[in-house]
Image (cartoon, rainbow, N blue to C red):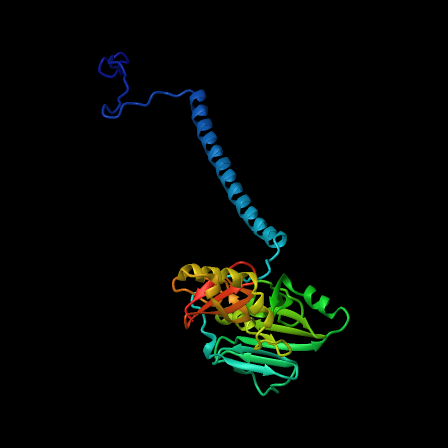
Amino acid sequence: MENQNDPIQQSSLPQQSYTNPQIPPLPPRSPDQIGTKAGSFFTKKLFLIILAIIVLSILIYAVIYLNLGSKLNKITKPNPTPTIASQPSKIPYDTTTWKTYVNRTFGYTFRYPSDWNMLGEQNPESNTIVLSSPADSFTFGVYVVNTTPNLLENLQTGLKQPKDITVAGVKATTGITFSGIGVDTNPNDFSVHNITTIIEHNNSIYNISASPINSKYIDYYDQVLSTFKFLDQKQDQQQPDFLTTPPQPVKLARDHLAKQLNTEVSNIEIIQIEEKIWGDSSLGCPKEGFFYIQVIIPGYRVTFQHKQTLYFYNSDKNLTFVECDK
């Protein structure tokens, strides 16, 4: 019979647990500590989501605002009418080599560059004459009709940016007109707009136009217009009263010449006075290195003589004159 009190079978050594000494046990965490960590992670994630939503909202708003603003600008800001700036001519054109066109049926004449030609087969005595440049599809034309009630007013009303000028000593109106078909839906398209001058003379209306206004040849328009004259005007005849009673700018020019020559005004003889239409502010005597505004200016061409020497002056009809070489 076995002895239950055998000291070998019943060891009196105490029981103990063993742990790995290299990995210390983690301290126990309470449920509150676990909940706090989870809550902090959730809060950060929620904050990032809200921040992303805010940034996305700002981007969407910016895109919508820019698109809407662009559309509103197109609606609220009307397209401007083409504007012809009064730009100085960098190279004054020598008109001495230009051709001369004369229409005796409708009583007018003008000069034009020698490389311009009649467009198609035209009757040179027709009420419509059109010239074209060798390039750039530029055209210059004159159209004459009989005056009828309200016609002049209607034509002038159709001009955009109208301006009163003088052509061949006659009051005229110049401006911009639409040369396309139908309604002028694109005012910024310079290729379908003309510069047009309307003149009424002897019960006829003269429409002088050039297009397109964005052509490099448009600078010629004012100078061609400055040569336009009516045949019933006494252009080549000396005005007798000018010699006995010179216009004021002619008197000023003579005084200027007398002072330059250090002589009496009575020693300066007026040989000839011609009425002229100048095409720019140089008054027909451009100086190298200067720029001039292209504008129609009526004035005079004066020839003085002192001791067998001729002197030439050009002027407007006010108080401005210039001394010319020839």
Residue 148 location, x and y as percent? 76, 73
Q: Quadrant of residue 197?
A: bottom right
Residue placed farthest to the right in the image? Answer: 149
Please report the residue visible at 57 percent of the width from the left and 86 percent of the height from the top.
120
Position of 173 relative to 54 (above/below): below
Q: Quadrant of residue 108?
A: bottom right
Residue 133 location, x and y as percent? 50, 78
Q: Is residue 83 visible?
A: no
Residue placed most toward the observer, 163 or 171: 171
Residue placed most toward the observer, 149 or 160: 149
Residue 295 location, x and y as percent? 54, 64
> Left or right: 155 with respect to 280?
right
Residue placed most toward the observer, 152 or 203: 203
Q: How many marks?
A: 0
> Left or right: 138 with respect to 13?
right
Quarter in which the N terminus is drawn: top left
Residue placed most toward the observer, 90 or 38: 90
Q: Is residue 118 visible?
A: yes
Please report the residue visible at 53 percent of the width from the left and 75 percent of the height from the top.
138
Please report the residue visible at 59 percent of the width from the left and 51 percent of the height from the top.
73
Position of 126 relative to 191 (above/below): below
> Left or right: 11 with respect to 226?
left
Please report the residue visible at 49 percent of the width from the left and 75 percent of the height from the top.
136
Position of 37 relative to 181 (above/below): above
Quarter in which the C terminus is drawn: bottom left
Q: Quadrant of residue 32?
A: top left
Residue 202 location, x and y as percent? 70, 75
